[in-house]
Image: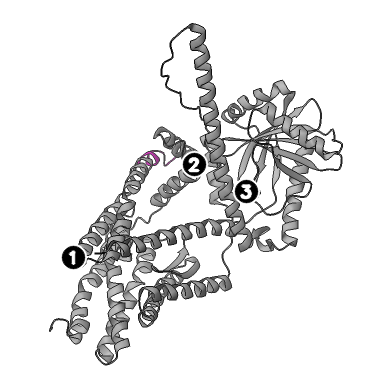
């Protein structure tokens, strides 16, 4: 076996995986429906949230800032964050501290200093500003003041204010919030006029076009890198200050220098109640479905890319045969999803890999899931075998190629290995609520690909074995966490919804996972809730569908032998 084909295929698969992940992020921004923001004054946040602010409020008090009000801010996407507004000696200068569940665990408070001007505008300074959204809100200018102490931060803001040569306005805190809210509302209308936002009257909101969604994703990527860099710089500064204080203390006491272990930073934790509230808002966040025209464009573009990629691996004739077989396979999934009431259906090709049919349905039954999974390989198998039986083989080369490829690919897809359709059928039938079910079949798949790869010395199979096994350590750790959360959630089934969610977020902290990004914690909890909602079918129904699957799995090889292999003379050579 040569190493180069294995490495090349693995690299291509990893690249495609990266591109698909980025496309998923872009789709998130494209599908989200945005609505005007609004502030709610004095929402009485919890004491835990006030405790997060307390250190920052105390740091600004020597500079003349005083707490004047608390607020709740609802963003474009319906997510809430709680904040406190400080005013500086009854002037037009304010400081805003905001806390959201979706913030970085090392930076749980977003800070900005604002000044209001007589022309109705507002200047807002933040430690680091990257233009995530295209354009600027009218009347609201955001500038980067850089990192450092609050004294330096406020001083840089004052320098920016002085450079504007515009008189300040002496207003109260509610008027400042009203100005910011009005600026963001005007921003949505302006972006809609310029064509970056699409108006959705039936959803009473807006949505970004594809180009803007790509730009926002790239800006968000840069922003996350900046936040990570700021957190690292703050940690280095803390360690330097700690080392300096330690050296001064040893010098004053006349103690010889020794090695002192640094204490870990104290990470302020977002309250679990806020995380639960944020999660609930995400569940009901409205999204738009792609239009039929857009789905057809996606199908056509990926079809062309698929043809090019398969032509690189095989000759053009076999590439066309593969595309035809994949279309029938995914078409079966598509029609089954449509028949079982799935929504947002789409089909697209994956260059060098295959194709996929996507759709969503809340609380799909066991019957729905199994029918959709079997509707891919079974029609292709039946079509290939019936074609071979009725027309016969050995007459036309292209027909022989289509039959053999269709039978081979679709039967392999029936095998009980995750992520193949057959493996997913077995997981649904036997382990739909068992968190280790997918791991068991993933191990079986990795070993099967490895053994067959050793026997055939095929580098592609070695690549599949590597991909199947590479995610096992992470998958096992995740399964262990999900099993613990499932057991914890089952003891609190009668509790209130927000209380159950908060308990699961709290359990993640007890497991030492509290410092994970909110998005990662939300994914774990979403997986638990999906497992809880998995169809609880009876034994008779499971046995019935298992009989259908086993019949197809066991009977097909005999049909293949009598219809295809004997006609082609594979056992007479």
Which residue has dot 3 on it? 78
Label of residue 455 in the image: 1
Q: Residues within 10 Å of mark 1 (few under 14, many from 20)?
A: few
- Return the x and y of residue 74 as percentages of the image width and height: 65, 44
Q: Are marks 1 and 2 in contact (CB under 8 Å)?
A: no
The span from disc 1 to disc 3 (Cα, nearest Å) is: 56 Å
Q: Which residues are magenta?
A: 487-494
Q: Earlier in the sequence, mark 3 or mark 2?
A: 3
Of the two numbered discs 1 and 2 in the rendering, the one whose residue sits closer to the viewer? 1
The span from disc 1 to disc 2 (Cα, nearest Å) is: 43 Å
Considering depth in this image, is 53 or 125 the residue closer to the camera? 125
Which quarter shows the C terminus? bottom left
- Return the x and y of residue 139 as percentages of the image width and height: 79, 46
Left-right relation of 384 to 38: left
Considering depth in this image, is 243 or 98 the residue closer to the camera? 243
Which quarter shows the N terminus? bottom left
Considering depth in this image, is 245 or 192 the residue closer to the camera? 245
Left-right relation of 153 to 424: right
- Return the x and y of residue 332 as percentages of the image width and height: 39, 74
- Vertical order, 562 against 17 (above or below): below
Which residue has dot 2 on it? 517
Tell me if residue 101 is in the magenta stretch: no
Q: Secondary structure at mark 3?
A: loop
Q: Is residue 287 visible?
A: no
Q: Residues within 10 Å of mark 3 (few under 14, many from 20)?
A: many
Q: Secondary structure at mark 2?
A: loop
Q: Secondary structure at mark 1?
A: helix
- Vertical order, 197 against 241 (above or below): below
Res. 294 image quadrant: bottom right
Q: Earlier in the sequence, mark 1 or mark 3?
A: 3
Residue at (51% x, 73% y) in the render:
301
């Amino acid at each position: 076996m040569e190493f180069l084909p294995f490495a090349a295929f693995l690299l291509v698969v990893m690249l495609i995986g990266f591109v698909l992940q980025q496309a998923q992020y872009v789709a998130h921004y494209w599908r989200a429906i945005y609505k005007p923001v609004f502030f709610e004054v004095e929402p009485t946040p919890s004491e835990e949230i006030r405790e997060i602010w307390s250190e920052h409020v105390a740091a600004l008090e020597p500079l003349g800032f005083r707490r004047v009000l608390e607020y709740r801010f609802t963003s474009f996407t319906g997510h809430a964050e709680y904040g406190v507004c400080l005013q500086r000696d009854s002037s037009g200068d304010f400081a805003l501290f905001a806390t959201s569940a979706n913030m970085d665990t090392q930076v749980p408070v977003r800070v900005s200093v604002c000044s209001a001007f007589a022309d109705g505008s507002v200047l807002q300074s933040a430690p680091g500003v990257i233009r995530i959204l295209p354009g600027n809100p009218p009347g609201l200018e955001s500038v980067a003041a850089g990192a450092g102490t609050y004294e330096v931060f406020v001083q840089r803001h004052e320098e920016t204010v002085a450079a504007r040569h515009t008189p300040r306005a002496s207003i109260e805190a509610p008027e400042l919030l009203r100005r910011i809210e009005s600026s963001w509302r005007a921003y949505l209308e302006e972006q809609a006029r310029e064509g970056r936002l699409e108006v959705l009257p039936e959803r009473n909101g807006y949505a970004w076009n594809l180009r803007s969604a790509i730009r926002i994703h790239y800006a968000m990527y840069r922003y996350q890198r900046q936040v990570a860099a700021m957190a690292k710089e703050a940690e280095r500064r803390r360690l330097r200050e700690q080392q300096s204080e330690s050296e001064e203390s040893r010098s004053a006491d006349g103690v010889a220098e020794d090695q002192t272990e640094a204490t870990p930073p104290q990470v302020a934790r977002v309250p679990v109640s806020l995380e639960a509230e944020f999660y609930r808002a995400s569940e009901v966040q409205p999204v738009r479905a792609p239009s039929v025209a857009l789905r057809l464009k996606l199908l056509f573009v990926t079809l062309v890319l698929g043809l090019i990629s398969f032509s690189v691996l095989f000759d053009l004739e076999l590439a066309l045969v593969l595309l035809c077989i994949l279309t029938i396979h995914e078409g079966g999934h598509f029609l089954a999803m449509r028949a079982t009431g799935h929504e947002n259906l789409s089909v697209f090709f994956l260059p060098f890999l295959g194709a996929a049919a996507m759709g969503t349905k809340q609380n799909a039954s066991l019957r729905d899931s199994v029918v959709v999974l079997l509707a891919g390989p079974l029609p292709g198998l039946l079509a290939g075998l019936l074609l071979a039986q009725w027309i016969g083989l050995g007459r036309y080369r292209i027909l022989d190629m289509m039959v053999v490829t269709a039978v081979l690919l679709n039967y392999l897809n029936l095998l009980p290995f995750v992520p193949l359709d057959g493996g997913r059928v077995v997981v649904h039938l036997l382990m739909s609520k068992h968190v280790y079910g997918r791991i068991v079949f993933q191990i079986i798949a990795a070993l099967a690909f490895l053994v067959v790869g050793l026997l055939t010395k095929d580098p592609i199979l070695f690549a599949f074995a590597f991909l199947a096994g590479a995610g096992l350590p992470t998958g096992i750790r995740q399964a262990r966490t999900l099993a613990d959360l499932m057991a914890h959630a089952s003891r609190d089934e009668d509790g209130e919804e927000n209380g159950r969610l908060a308990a699961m977020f709290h359990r993640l902290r007890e497991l030492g996972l509290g410092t994970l990004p909110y998005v990662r914690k939300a994914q774990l909890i979403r997986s638990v809730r999906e497992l809880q909602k998995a169809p609880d079918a009876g034994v008779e129904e499971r046995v019935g569908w298992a009989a259908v699957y086993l019949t197809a799995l066991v009977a097909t090889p005999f049909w293949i032998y009598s219809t295809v292999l004997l006609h082609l003379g594979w056992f007479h050579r």
